[in-house]
Image (tube, rainbow, N blue to C red):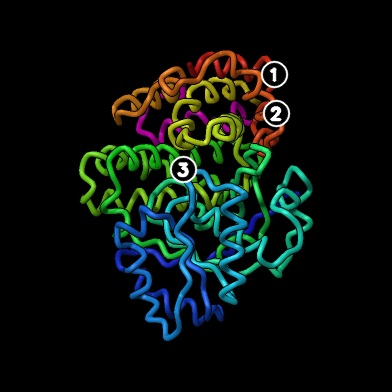
Amino acid sequence: MSLINYITQIQFDFGAVRLLAGECERIGMRRPLIVTDAGIRAAGLVDKVLDALAASSPVAVFDATPPNPNEAAVRAAVAMYKDNDCDGVIAVGGGSSIDLAKGVAVCATHEGPLQSFAVIEGGLARITAKTAPVIAIPTTAGTGSEVGRGAILILDDGRKVGVISPHVVPKVAICDPELTLGLPPMLTAATGMDAIAHCLETFMAPAFNPPADGIALDGLWRAWRHIERATRDGSDRAARWNMMSASMQGALAFQKGLGCVHSLSHSLGGINPKLHHGTLNAIFLPAVIAFNGSAPTMIDEGKLDRIAQAMGLASGAEVGDAVRQMTAALGLPRGLAELGVTREMFPRIIAGALKDHSHKTNPRDASNADYEAMLEASM
């Protein structure tokens, strides 16, 4: 049985942040907690959000989101949420702030530690409609978490887990490309490759969902044509618009599942939280594409050739090399060794990947040896 469901209201265009007050009123959010990070606040983006709110009462702001959000940050933000009697969360930032906001929305309204809501711990059944409403305002174009049903968070024990439920999908996504105009080149490149990875991996996932496939391919088409422009010239409004769309589209297709790219990235990111998720996805993509090429669903549906068409390539055989070339052209690290990853780390990475929720939705079942080969190919 296939479940096809799109439930987020999306406001998309330059200047869309000005609609925030009306959206808060529409969903009944009167005392929001803004979840963001210090960099976003210093850049003046939180001020734009506060101006858009035009709130008559004070708005609480939690600006201590770490680059890879963790259980300690969830606890600290939940304490602020409760101290200020908040009734909803507004996430302002990249995937880290949005994912943290989702963790707060769950933990502020349910009993139990964050670990109990991880999908690998049976958390899906524990997350209910009591979850606080979230409005997500992305300031990067990569994760697409503003329309996703999950959050990736690091537990106190070091595991990087998914908290997944229809109840954590933001009630509103305000996608304003203007908020990404000041994004630095390397962050533009890394987050952009994250969006490309999402479009590719959701399309490769075997679940039956033709609408999601179409959304993912169109998102890939947009991202592949505009990522270099956005990286080279951050003020290119058309490039920024298309990259934000691609990011959102990749995440709309998340309901199909992801795969080995993300199971590896989640695992390694849990081991070393300083590593950027989008950069890891870019590095792992070619090896996983090669591994997935012989999967029955990939062959029967001609998926590699359809991917190649979206990327403007002659055949599916060129996809992996094209990703490598794009990663190099953007100036991102081309292998794990450049990030300080060693072969001695492989057993820990593989153990985490085999337990990750994304492992289960790859088009081919990956064994310990398969993961080792993918890691070797990605060094």
- Give the residue pinned by disc 3: 217
Tell me the SS state at disc 3: helix
Image quadrant assignment for residue 105:
bottom right
Q: Do the numbered discs 1 and 2 sit on residues whose CB atoms are within 8 Å?
A: yes
Q: Is residue 24 above or below residue 35?
A: below
Q: Residue at x 67, y 35 (%)?
A: 356
**What amino acid type should be assigned to the residue bearing mark 2?**
Leu
Q: Earlier in the sequence, mark 2 or mark 3?
A: 3
* Mark 3 closeness class: few <14, some 14–19, many ≥20 residues within 10 Å: many
* Mark 1 closeness class: few <14, some 14–19, many ≥20 residues within 10 Å: few
Disc number lying in front (1 or 3): 1
* Mark 1 → mark 2, Cα distance in angstroms: 8 Å
Q: Is residue 88 above or below residue 70?
A: below
Tell me the SS state at disc 1: helix
Tell me the SS state at disc 2: helix
Q: Do the numbered discs 1 and 3 sit on residues whose CB atoms are within 8 Å?
A: no
Q: Position of residue 58 (x, y in %)?
A: 45, 79
- Give the residue pinned by disc 2: 354
- Give the residue pinned by disc 1: 368
Q: Residue at x 66, y 61 (%)?
A: 106
Q: Residue at x 65, y 55 (%)?
A: 4
**What amino acid type should be assigned to the residue bearing mark 1?**
Asn
* Image disc number at residue 340: none
313 part of magenta stretch: yes
Q: Position of residue 102 (x, y in %)?
A: 59, 58
94, 198: nearer the viewer: 94
* Mark 2 closeness class: few <14, some 14–19, many ≥20 residues within 10 Å: many
Q: Earlier in the sequence, mark 1 or mark 3?
A: 3
* Mark 2 → mark 3, Cα distance in angstroms: 27 Å
Report the span colored magenta. Answer: 297-317
**What amino acid type should be assigned to the residue bearing mark 3?**
Leu
